[in-house]
Each structure stands twice: as structure tokens, then as C-alpha cells.
Image (cartoon, rainbow, N blue to C red):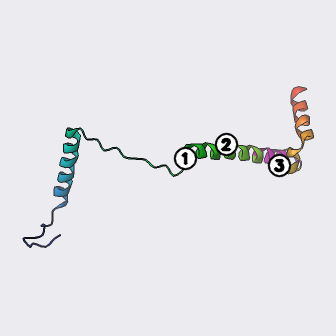
Amino acid sequence: MSLNNSNQKVAETREQVRQEKKEKVKAEANSGGKRRRIRIRLIPLWLRLLIIALSLVVCVILGAMFGYSVIGEGKATDIFQKSTWTHIIDLIEHE
């Protein structure tokens, strides 16, 4: 590209290359030919929503386990028992 033979193109400066690109974009815009960029999503929308929902459920369970075991001084696995939740609801309703 940088050889000065009559058969090969002479090296251009960066400014000349940029100018040519700008002119090409202007010519495409003036001709009405819009090139739309096709966007390919790596993770589909339904999978994104599923990941968000599952992470929300996991965070709620981990938060309940942490709160019941560390703050409430109980066993972390007790949150999966129905009696624990009925006791918590009774405490809330009776106050």
C-alpha cells in the first residue's frame, strides 16, 4: 500500500481516509439508502426475564434464611417449614 509504483496506490494520510469515509457516509445519506444494523442478541428476552425471576426468588430465600438464622437466632432450614411461617404471620397479626 505504501509503495510508489504506478500500479499500486500511494499511501494516504489519516486525514484523507477520514475525509473519504465522511464523504461516503454523506453520499449514502443523500441517496436515501439507510443501512440498518442488524442486532443479534446473545441472550433472548424470555431468558433474561427468567434469569431475573429466578435470581429474585433465590435472593428472597437467602434473605429469609439469613434473617431467621442470624437475626432471629434460629436454624436457617426452618424457613422451609409451614409452622415457622404460621408463627411469623401470627406474630404480625396479633400486634
Q: Residues within 10 Å of mark 1 (few under 14, many from 20)?
A: few
The amino acid on which the numbered mark 1 sits, given as a three-letter code, is Pro
Would residue 34 be found to the left or right of residue 68 on screen?
left
At 87% from the left and 37% from the top, the residue drawn is 85
The residue wearing badge 1 is 44
Instruction: Report how far apart the C-alphas of labels 2 and 1 lie in the structure.
Output: 14 Å
Whether residue 95 is visible here, answered yes or no, is: no
Above or below for 63 versus 7? above
Secondary structure under badge 1? loop
The disc label shown at residue 70, or none: 3
At 69% from the left and 43% from the top, the residue drawn is 56
Above or below for 20 versus 84? below
Q: Nearer the viewer, mark 2 or mark 1?
A: 1
The amino acid on which the numbered mark 3 sits, given as a three-letter code, is Val
Secondary structure under badge 3? helix
The residue wearing badge 2 is 53
At 21% from the left and 54% from the top, the residue drawn is 18
- Mark 2 or 3, nearer chain start: 2
Q: Where is residue 69 in the image (x, y as percent from the top left)?
A: 85, 48
Q: Position of residue 52 (x, y in %)?
A: 63, 44
Would residue 33 be found to the left or right of residue 43 on screen?
left
Q: Residues within 10 Å of mark 3 (few under 14, many from 20)?
A: few
* Residue stretch rendered in magenta on the structure: 63-74
Instruction: Report how far apart the C-alphas of labels 2 and 3 lie in the structure.
Output: 26 Å
At 76% from the left and 48% from the top, the residue drawn is 62
Identify the image quadrant of the N terminus: bottom left
Would residue 54 be found to the left or right of residue 27 on screen?
right
**72 or 41, which lies in front?**
41
Question: Which image quarter: residue 88?
Answer: top right
Question: Which image quarter: residue 31?
Answer: top left
Instruction: Report how far apart the C-alphas of labels 1 and 3 lie in the structure.
Output: 38 Å
